[in-house]
Amino acid sequence: MRGLAILLGGLTLTTAAFAADDPIAVRQALMDNNGAAAALAGAVMKDELAYSPVIGKAVIEALSATAHAYGSFFPEGSNDPARTHASPKIWEDPAAFQAALDKYSADAAAARQASGKDGPADKAAFAAAVQPVLGNCKSCHEDFRLQD
Ligand code: HEC
């Protein structure tokens, strides 16, 4: 047990150091997670995957976790254009970026609230809960993400 505690403690420290040292890598990993969650939602909407409340819950929790964490990984100087697609507008107009983050968080919190303890009961309830959250992807990318 003690060995496990030391191991887990070590992992936490490593993660913390990684986050502090490389916020670009962390925020891109968070967005990759968002991409995977949105793809899962899309597969359900297109009936490529049978809906179950467990899936709805997992998608909404993943989007919500990113919404909470995302804004913490944009320190000054983390804008090396060789590595990031984050737009300079994030640092030029932080209030506007914060407003986009706040809207994303509020929509994710509402979806979480609507999904209850066990996840939305059926596909229609899932769609109604998740679609407002997914609307944030496009709007924030248009304003704050550079195209390739
Ligand atoms: C509040 C703003 C904001 C919201 C909301 C947002 N994104 Fe992003 N997203 C960004 C920014 C900024 C980047 C570029 C980050 C970078 O390259 O450092 C990005 C990058 C990405 C990437 C590429 C990640 C990589 O590895 O380079 C994916 C995939 C992505 N977003 C998916 C999504 C999806 C899906 C949603 C909606 C569920 C979403 N995003 C919502 C701002 C946002």
Image: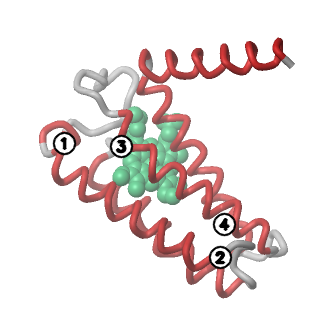
Q: Which three-letter amino acid code belongs to the residue tagged 3?
A: Gly
Q: Residues within 10 Å of mark 2 (few under 14, many from 20)?
A: few
Residue under numbered circle 1: 89
Q: Nearer the viewer, mark 1 or mark 2?
A: 2
The residue drawn where x is 26% and y is 54% is 143
Q: Nearer the viewer, mark 2 or mark 3?
A: 2
Give the mark nearest the N terminus, 2 or 4: 4
Q: Is residue 73 visible?
A: yes
Give the mark nearest the N terminus, 4 or 1: 4
Q: Which three-letter amino acid code belongs to the residue tagged 2?
A: Gly
Q: Nearer the viewer, residue 108 or 31?
A: 108
| Mark 2 to mark 4 CA distance (whole Å) | 17 Å
Q: Residues within 10 Å of mark 1 (few under 14, many from 20)?
A: some
Q: Nearer the viewer, residue 145 or 54?
A: 54
Q: Is mark 3 within 8 Å of ligand 1?
A: yes
Determine contact: label 2, label 4, CB under 8 Å: no
Residue under numbered circle 3: 71
| Residue 69 found in image quarter | top left
User: Disc 4 on helix, strand or loop?
Assistant: helix
Q: Which three-letter amino acid code belongs to the residue tagged 4?
A: Ala
Residue 73 on image: x %, y % = 38, 33
